[in-house]
Image (spheres, rainbow, N blue to C red):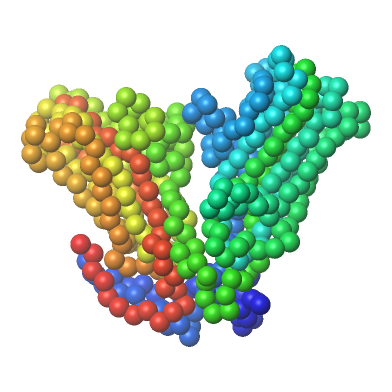
Amino acid sequence: MGRKFPGDCCPRPPCVCSSPVNNRNDNQVKIEIDSLNCCCNPKCPCESGELVRNGSFEMISANATQPFVDWRVLNALSNTIVSRVPINVAPVAYEGVHSAWFITEPSELEQHFISLQQNVTVTPGCIYRFSFAENLLTASDFTPSLTGRVFYTDGAGSQFDLISIFIEKDINISNIDRGYTFHQKTADIPVPCDVSRVTVQFDFSVRDDGGTIWLLDGVSLRAVSCASSCSQHDCAVARDICQPGNLVRNGGFEDISGSVDSPFLYWRQIPETGGQAFIESRSDTPYEGAFAAIFISSATALAELKSVSLRQIVPVTPGCRLELSFAENFLERGESSGTTPRLIARVYWVNDSGTEFDLIYVPIAKVDGENDEDKGYSFHKRTADIPVPCNVSSVYIEFEFSVTNTGNTQWLLDSVQLRSLPWESACCQEFKGVAKHD
């Protein structure tokens, strides 16, 4: 039996409390939350937004072994691939510009098989709806099949389907290149109380000598229930209220956009025009993965202040405490830099008046001369002293690089993560206190 809540909780916004967050001075923030004035916010709410990342396949991966950001190809058999639209072929998309193309190419083996999957963090006890669109563009002499699945894996490695949509199309003119067909199915049961992650996977199979093309687009997974049914009084797995997964997108800088104002997907360079300091990708000295971000100051005739920032907007759950971590490597000290090189990591929110409030602030200064150059990566982790205010649903994560010099200063950044601590949200509870920033 699910827990009962007063009124209809689902359409209400999350936890907008009557007591605001007051910034009394630069180093003190006071939060007052009155549980009686909060909106209806169940202790174990289900998500209200889209859970599948890059479900329309618009973002192409910089990794040559994977076609799309956030998706992974596996189980490939024979000459079978998943790709974006081939060269010199007009795009055929259900939404946006791109779609995923399952393609069989000529091979000695006639059996073709391949899977495309993504892991998704979910809330135990919630019920989810799965949907996608598909279009069999061309086919050979055999009957192809496409199966969309949402499943979880137990500790022994066994898979259990929550949702499965099996599609098989006979080879006749009525099934080929007739446009997209939309499919949608809701799970019959909620996610088990000891499960916090599921896998969305598409299995494509056909026995042919090449030439079959099946398109996939518009993949979606959303909760249809308002609150978890795992317990009458609390969440069975409390850590899944404040989701423990990394909230930063492309924190490893593996996906490169190539534009001046956005050197990496999801990240923006501030100021956007570059100038005497700028940000690029670096592939020869990463902390993890294949790429890192590098802050660079240009050489000038006179010592000048040069600065640039890298920023991303991150959706968060109100009432959760955040933890920021990253790795940095001061690679090269430009001429006349002295003690001026700085890298400041911030997590902050902005009110309606444009005032910024820091939740996490990590200043790093390089003052040891040549002794602190190119010594490898240093890992940093900092937890916010206070939770995200109840009327804040997104924060900024920003890295500010600055130096006054004539030469070329270089500073590497990699493995950026922002996570919620595995606690219950402080919103709609009695929480009163004063916390100070460092």
Q: Locate the C terminus and report the quarter of the image it occupies.
A: bottom left
> Is residue 412 shown to the viewer in this render?
yes
Q: Locate the N terminus and report the quarter of the image it occupies.
A: bottom right
Q: Is residue 12 left or right of residue 315?
A: right
Above or below, 339 against 142 in this view is below
Q: Position of residue 395 (x, y in %)?
A: 41, 56
Give the residue furthest to the bottom: 36
> Is residue 261 shown to the viewer in this render?
no
Q: Residue at x 32, y 32 (%)?
A: 286
Above or below, 197 against 414 in this view is below
Above or below, 308 against 359 in this view is above
Q: Position of residue 40 (x, y in %)?
A: 56, 77
Give the residue furthest to the front: 156
Q: Position of residue 102 (x, y in %)?
A: 70, 29
Task: Residue 355: name its quadrant.
Answer: bottom left
Which is more toward the observer, 339 or 322? 322
Q: Residue at x 83, y 37 (%)?
A: 168
Q: Residue at x 39, y 33 (%)?
A: 289
Which is more toward the observer, 307 or 7? 7
Q: Is residue 390 left or right of residue 23?
A: right
Task: Residue 98: name its quadrant.
Answer: top right
Which is more toward the observer, 188 or 26? 188
Q: Is residue 249 left or right of residue 332?
A: right
Q: Residue at x 9, y 31 (%)?
A: 370
Which is more toward the observer, 95 or 124? 124
Above or below, 312 against 434 in this view is above
